Image (cartoon, helix red, strand yellow):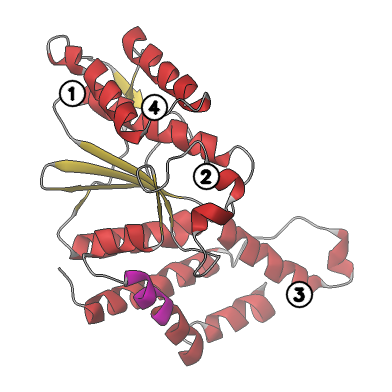
């Protein structure tokens, strides 16, 4: 388990490196012309860079940060993606569809544990009759962060904290698909999947009480993690998000990225 000081160093170095690399890669990107370029060209270009970073925050920042912290706490980072059966077996496809319908109908039986167990159960036949052909998971259903420790495979995907209509339904299906892909290939394995919201934009107010539809049909905690649910788990340290927050503040105060930001925003862009 890392110390708080070690986590702070990891966060600071990863944030500076990730944001620096992103901004540098924007050097030669010329945004499409918009009429506002004639009135506020600098501000419009800044928004283009910042907006692009906000959109790609998961892969640009949260994913490398999570992997670095997890690695320091003894997790194995799997740098590959889940594979799906080339032809999804009917028993598995029907099971996943049944679980989706059960949750959508708000049947209390279809909680997170029940859904996991039914998928794993339906895959036990593949111990005797294994599936031979696998292909990369369909677009949108891959896994961003795959960790392994003590015989358990952990699947995580970071999402925007400002969800829109339909986001949580897609998240729920994503969790079910992760289980179905994994257990179809490793029926005797153990999988643990969560959708991650890396920070709580509502401060001390409960995230699930404020987010659209209260996160339904995703099940809070058992299918979705917020802030320290995730960061404390991968670091092994309580209050890890406060360390992340402190590191961001330090970067702002010391101006570590200031020269690069000034160059990109006001020099070469």
- Dominant secondary structure (helix, strand or loop) of the stretch shown in magenta: helix
Classify residue 134 by image quadrant: top left
Q: Which residue is identified by label 2?
A: 215
Of pointers 4 and 1, the one earlier in the residue sequence: 4
Question: x%, y% of residue 91?
Answer: 32, 10
**Does residue 221 lie above or below 69 as drawn?**
above
Badge 3 element? helix
Of pointers 4 and 3, the one earlier in the residue sequence: 3
User: How many marks overall?
Assistant: 4
Of pointers 2 and 3, the one earlier in the residue sequence: 3
Q: Residue at x 18, y 26 (%)?
A: 186
**Contact (Cβ within 8 Å) of mark 4 with mark 1:** no
- Mark 2 or 4, which is nearer the eye? 4
Q: Which residue is identified by label 4?
A: 110
Residue 160 in view: no
**Does residue 180 lie above or below 225 as drawn?**
above
Along the line of sight, which residue is nearer the eye, 103 or 253? 103
Classify residue 98 by image quadrant: top left
Q: Residue at x 21, y 65 (%)?
A: 236
């Amino acid at each position: 388990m890392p110390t708080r000081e070690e986590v702070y160093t990891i966060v600071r170095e990863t944030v500076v490196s990730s944001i620096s690399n992103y901004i540098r890669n924007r050097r030669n990107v010329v945004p499409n012309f918009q009429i506002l370029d004639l009135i506020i060209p600098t501000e419009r270009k800044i928004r283009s860079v910042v907006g692009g970073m906000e959109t790609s925050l998961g892969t640009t920042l949260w994913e490398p940060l999570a992997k670095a912290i997890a690695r320091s706490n003894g997790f194995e980072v799997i740098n590959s993606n889940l594979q799906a059966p080339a032809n999804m077996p009917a028993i598995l496809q029907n099971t996943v569809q049944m679980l989706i319908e059960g949750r959508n109908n708000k049947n209390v039986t279809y909680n997170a544990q029940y859904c996991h167990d039914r998928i794993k159960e339906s895959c036990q036949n593949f111990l005797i009759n294994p599936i031979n052909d696998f292909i990369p998971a369909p677009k949108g259903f891959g896994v961003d962060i795959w960790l392994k420790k003590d015989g358990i495979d952990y699947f995580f995907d970071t999402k925007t904290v400002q969800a829109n209509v339909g986001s949580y339904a897609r998240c729920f299906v994503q969790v079910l698909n992760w289980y179905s892909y994994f257990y179809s290939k490793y029926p005797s394995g153990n999988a643990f999947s969560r959708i991650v919201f890396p920070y709580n934009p509502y401060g001390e107010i409960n995230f699930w009480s404020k987010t659209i539809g209260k996160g339904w049909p995703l099940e809070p905690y058992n299918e979705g993690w917020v802030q320290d649910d995730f960061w404390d788990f991968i670091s092994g340290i309580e209050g890890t998000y406060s360390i992340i927050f402190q590191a961001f503040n330090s970067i702002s105060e010391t101006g570590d990225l200031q020269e690069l930001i000034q160059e990109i925003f006001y020099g070469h862009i």
